[in-house]
């Protein structure tokens, strides 16, 4: 099957299923399986400029949304040449990836007869369901069953490691300028890691707030997980948050890989957060995933 993945999480799922050879098109953000972006046509790119600060990104995104301008650009010629049988897309967040409506319109205009699977998980359980759905659509249901079972086993191991221990009050921030409280599966990640999530909405969208409201939550730990940023940037932004919340321990995480991407590595993220919250109960993750700032 020829698979075009227009969503980094879906590309990662396809790779984890052992189907990387079936990928015929990816996005500019697809970095798992390693090297996939260099060996496949990139059919989705960002419409945003390179290098802005979080505050500038927020302003640019809001301005483009107000003017009904896209946040992403689809290379229709490259998609036509890829001739996919299956297209993986999303409609969860127009800021995070190309929306489904743009994809279906392009397929119709290009006269491409491809199956479209929209991957729109809102919760951690739905992420696991999405893994199984991609496997079925790609003709590999058994691989999906095995992958989900392995992820569930790892989650159970975390539950057992942190069960019965004191649960620190954790405030997760998905953005820092302005601050955004977490949504979707992030509160569940904190909970499964042995923390008590503050604010945020299970299964809902992240919500902008103020620093006064952030401080009023009185957290034991702040998890700085800025959407789309890796660990180095998360650490730098955590340093800025620490100036606003002096004395509160900060945990910075590679959010782009382990928090906001709705794929198998969310479990890696939960393991890393669990170690940050309970270092004497959960093994340390590989370097580069998380940093605790005292």
Image (tube, rainbow, N blue to C red):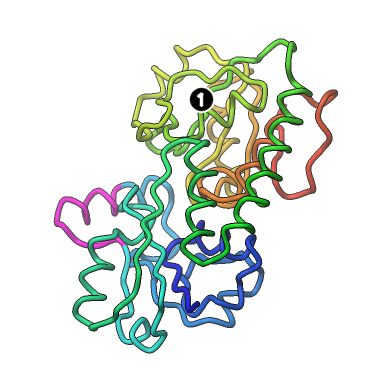
Q: Residue at coordinates 50% horizontally, 42% vertically from top-left?
A: 226
Q: Nearer the viewer, residue 82 or 73?
A: 82
Spot occupied by residue 193 in the image (x, y as percentages of width and height) = 66, 27
Q: Is residue 233 above or below residue 173?
A: below
Q: Please, which residue is most extreme toward the left here?
A: 67
Q: Is residue 88 left or right of residue 23?
A: left
Q: Is residue 103 left or right of residue 256?
A: left
Q: Is residue 187 above or below residue 122?
A: above
Q: Nearer the viewer, residue 266 or 224?
A: 266
Give the residue at mark 1: 244
Q: Is residue 165 left or right of residue 142?
A: right
Q: Please, which residue is most extreme toward the bottom here?
A: 81
Q: Is residue 41 left or right of residue 13?
A: left
The tally of labels here is 1
Spot occupied by residue 190 in the image (x, y as percentages of width and height) = 59, 27
Q: Is residue 69 magenta?
A: yes
Spot occupied by residue 248 in the image (x, y as percentages of width and height) = 62, 19
Quadrant of res 99? bottom left
Q: Is residue 171 above or below residue 145?
A: above
Q: Residue at coordinates 70% horizontally, 46% vertically from top-left?
A: 289
Q: Nearer the viewer, residue 213 or 280?
A: 280
Spot occupied by residue 61 in the image (x, y as percentages of width and height) = 29, 52
Q: Secondary structure at mark 1?
A: helix
Q: Is residue 154 above or below residue 188?
A: below
Q: In the image, which residues are magenta? A: 59-71
| Main SS category, magenta section | helix
Q: Nearer the viewer, residue 236 or 137?
A: 137
Q: Residue at coordinates 20% horizontally, 76% vertically from top-left?
A: 108
Mark 1: give few (<14), some (14-19) or many (20+) Cα within 10 Å: some
Q: Is residue 222 magenta?
A: no
């Amino acid at each position: 099957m020829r698979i075009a993945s227009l969503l980094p999480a879906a590309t990662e799922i396809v790779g984890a299923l052992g189907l990387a050879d079936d990928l015929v098109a990816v996005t500019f953000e697809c970095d798992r399986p390693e090297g996939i972006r260099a060996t496949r046509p990139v059919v989705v790119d960002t419409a945003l400029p390179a290098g802005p600060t979080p505050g500038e990104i927020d302003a640019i995104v809001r301005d483009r949304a107000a003017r009904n301008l896209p946040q992403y650009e689809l290379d229709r010629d490259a998609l036509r040449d890829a001739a996919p049988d299956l297209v993986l897309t999303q409609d969860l967040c127009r800021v995070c990836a190309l929306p489904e409506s743009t994809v279906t319109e392009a397929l119709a205009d290009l006269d491409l007869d491809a199956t479209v699977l929209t991957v729109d998980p809102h919760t951690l359980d739905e992420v696991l369901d999405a893994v199984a759905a991609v496997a079925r659509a790609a003709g590999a249901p058994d691989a999906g069953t095995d992958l989900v079972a392995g992820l569930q086993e790892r989650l159970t191991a975390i539950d057992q490691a942190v069960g019965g221990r004191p649960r620190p009050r954790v405030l997760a921030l998905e953005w820092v300028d302005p601050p955004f409280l977490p949504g979707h599966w992030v509160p569940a990640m904190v909970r499964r890691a042995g923390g008590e999530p503050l604010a945020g909405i299970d299964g809902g969208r992240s919500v902008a707030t103020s620093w006064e409201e952030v401080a009023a939550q009185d957290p034991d730990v702040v998890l700085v997980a800025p959407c789309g940023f890796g660990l180095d940037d998360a650490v730098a932004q955590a340093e800025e948050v620490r100036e606003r919340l002096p004395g509160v321990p900060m945990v910075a995480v590679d959010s782009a890989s382990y928090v906001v991407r709705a794929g198998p590595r969310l479990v890696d993220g939960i393991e890393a957060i669990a170690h940050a919250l309970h270092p004497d109960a959960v093994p340390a993750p590989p370097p580069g995933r998380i940093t605790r700032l005292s």
